[in-house]
C-alpha cells in the first residue's frame, strides 16, 4: 500500500472537477432505486481507496477522490483513466467478472443518474457480483478447500505468469525497489511509537538487506533473465474465487511499479496468507506448477526471502490501517502486525542458515 495516503472523506471539500462531493455520491449509489436493473437492496463496503456497492447481481466500485505516492484520483478524468486500467488489468484473470465502466451524470434538473444526458461526474467499474462464500479465504476458514480447486488455481496462475508482460527493469531499479520496501517498513514502525515493534521490524529489515547484499547476483540474474513480470500486485485468498474456472480479482491497478514483481514473490505471498489460514500445503503446489509451466528454477532461499519481505510489508500495512476509521481496535491492528513480524522472523531464520 502506498505511503502518505491523503483520503477525502464525507464532509471534506468536493471534487474540484464538478462540485459533487463524495458524500452525495455515496448517498445516491446507496439507494436501490438509483440502479437501472431495479435492485432490491444495496450493501456498501468501504475499502481504503474505494466504496463498493453490491446490488442483487452486480458490484459497482467508486474510487475515492484520494491522492498519495504514485497516484492521484482527485479529478473525474483521473478516475476514468483508472477505471479503464482496472477493467483492462483485471480482465487478464477474471474476464467474465469485469463488465464495463459506467458513467454517473448530473442531469439538467440537478439530479444524479446512470448513463443519461448530462455532465459526467464520475465513473464506476461494473462487475458481476460473486458469491463471497466461494472465495478462497472462506474455504480456508471452513477447512473445506479441495486439492482439485487448488490444482486449477495453480494451473491458472502458471499460465498467467508464463504469458505475462515482461517488465523493463534494470538491476539497480529492481533491487532499489526491494530496499525501498524495507526502508518504508522501518519508517512506518518508527512513527508508531512502539519501541518493541520497531526493534522487531528493524531486525527483520536488516536481515533482508543483508541477504540482498550477500546474494545480489541471484536477484540481478532474475532481472537480467527477464523473470520480472507485470503481475497481480495483491494476490491474497480473499481475491481468489473458486467456482469452476478460478478467477482472481481486484489487482493493484493504480501503481504499475508495484505490479512489476517476481512471480515467485507473488506466489510466496499467496502461500503465506494461505498458511496463516490453515492451507499449509497450498504454496508448494502453486510453486511446483509454476516452475513446471515456465521452466523457472526455484531457489528455496528466494521463497523464504519473499515470504519474509511480504510479511514485513503486511505488518507495515496493519500499522497504517490504524489511521483509518473502522470497527477494529488499535489492539487488533497491533496484534496483526506482531503476527506478521513473527512470520518474518521465522522466514529470516532460514536465510541465516
Image (cartoon, rainbow, N blue to C red):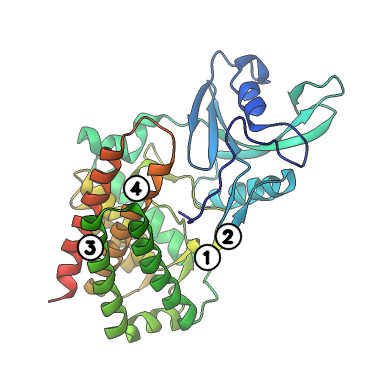
Residue at figure coordinates x 74%, y 24% from the top left: 113
- Drawn side of residue 146 relative to residue 248, left or right: left
Q: Quadrant of the C terminus?
A: bottom left
Mark 1 crowdedness (10 Å alpha carbons): few <14, some 14-19, many ≥20: some
Label drawn at residue 257: 1
Q: Are marks 2 and 1 in contact (CB under 8 Å)?
A: yes
Q: Is residue 56 above or below residue 175?
A: above
Q: Secondary structure at mark 4?
A: helix
* Whole-percent x, y for residue 252 in the image: 50, 53
> For the residues carrying marks 3 and 1, which lies nearer the camera in this image?
3
Q: CA distance from mark 2 to mark 1?
A: 9 Å
Q: Which mark is residue 199?
A: 3
Q: Earlier in the sequence, mark 3 or mark 1?
A: 3
Q: Quadrant of residue 161?
A: bottom left
Q: What is the number of the mark on residue 318?
A: 4
**Of callouts 2 and 1, the N-terminal one:** 2
CA gap, disc 3 and disc 2: 29 Å
Considering the numbered disc 2 on the image, is that residue within a helix, a strand or a loop?
Answer: loop
Viewer-nearest of labels 2 and 1?
Answer: 2
Tell me residue 268's x, y (percent): 30, 60
Is residue 83 at all visible to an observer of this figure? Answer: yes
* Residue at 34% in and 74% down: 296
Residues marked 3 and 1 touching at CB (< 8 Å): no
Amino acid at each position: 500500500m502506498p505511503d502518505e495516503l491523503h483520503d477525502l472523506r464525507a464532509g471534506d471539500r468536493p471534487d474540484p472537477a464538478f462540485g459533487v462531493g463524495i458524500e452525495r455520491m455515496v448517498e445516491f449509489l446507496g439507494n436501490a432505486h438509483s440502479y437501472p436493473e431495479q435492485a432490491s437492496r444495496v450493501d456498501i463496503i468501504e475499502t481504503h481507496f474505494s466504496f463498493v456497492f453490491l446490488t442483487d447481481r452486480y458490484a459497482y466500485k467508486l474510487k475515492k477522490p484520494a491522492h498519495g505516492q504514485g497516484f492521484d484520483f482527485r479529478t473525474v478524468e483521473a478516475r476514468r483513466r483508472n477505471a479503464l486500467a482496472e477493467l483492462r488489468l483485471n480482465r487478464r484473470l477474471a474476464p467474465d467478472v469485469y463488465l464495463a465502466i459506467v458513467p454517473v451524470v448530473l442531469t439538467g434538473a440537478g439530479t444524479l443518474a446512470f448513463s443519461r444526458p448530462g455532465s459526467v461526474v464520475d465513473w464506476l467499474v461494473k462487475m458481476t457480483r460473486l458469491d463471497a462464500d466461494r472465495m478462497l479465504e472462506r474455504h480456508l476458514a471452513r477447512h473445506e478447500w479441495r486439492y482439485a480447486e487448488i490444482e486449477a488455481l495453480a494451473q491458472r496462475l502458471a499460465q498467467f505468469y508464463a504469458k505475462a508482460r515482461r517488465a523493463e527493469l534494470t538491476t539497480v531499479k529492481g533491487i532499489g525497489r526491494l530496499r525501498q520496501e524495507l526502508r518504508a517498513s522501518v519508517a512506518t514502525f518508527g512513527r508508531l511509537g512502539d519501541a518493541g515493534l520497531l526493534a522487531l521490524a528493524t531486525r527483520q529489515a536488516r536481515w533482508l538487506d543483508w541477504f540482498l547484499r550477500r546474494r545480489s547476483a541471484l536477484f540481478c540474474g532474475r532481472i537480467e533473465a527477464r523473470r520480472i513480470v507485470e503481475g497481480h500486485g495483491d494476490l491474497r485468498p480473499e481475491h481468489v474465487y473458486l467456482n469452476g474456472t478460478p478467477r482472481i480479482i481486484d489487482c493493484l491497478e493504480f501503481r504499475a511499479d508495484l505490479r512489476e514483481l517476481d512471480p515467485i514473490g507473488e506466489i510466496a505471498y499467496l502461500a503465506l496468507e494461505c498458511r496463516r489460514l490453515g492451507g499449509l500445503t497450498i504454496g508448494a503446489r502453486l510453486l511446483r506448477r509454476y516452475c513446471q509451466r515456465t521452466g523457472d528454477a526455484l531457489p528455496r532461499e528466494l521463497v523464504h526471502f519473499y515470504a519474509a519481505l511480504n510479511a514485513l510489508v503486511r505488518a507495515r500495512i496493519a500499522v497504517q490501517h490504524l489511521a483509518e476509521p473502522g470497527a477494529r481496535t488499535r489492539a487488533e491492528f497491533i496484534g496483526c502486525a506482531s503476527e506478521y513480524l513473527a512470520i518474518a522472523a521465522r522466514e529470516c531464520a532460514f536465510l541465516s542458515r
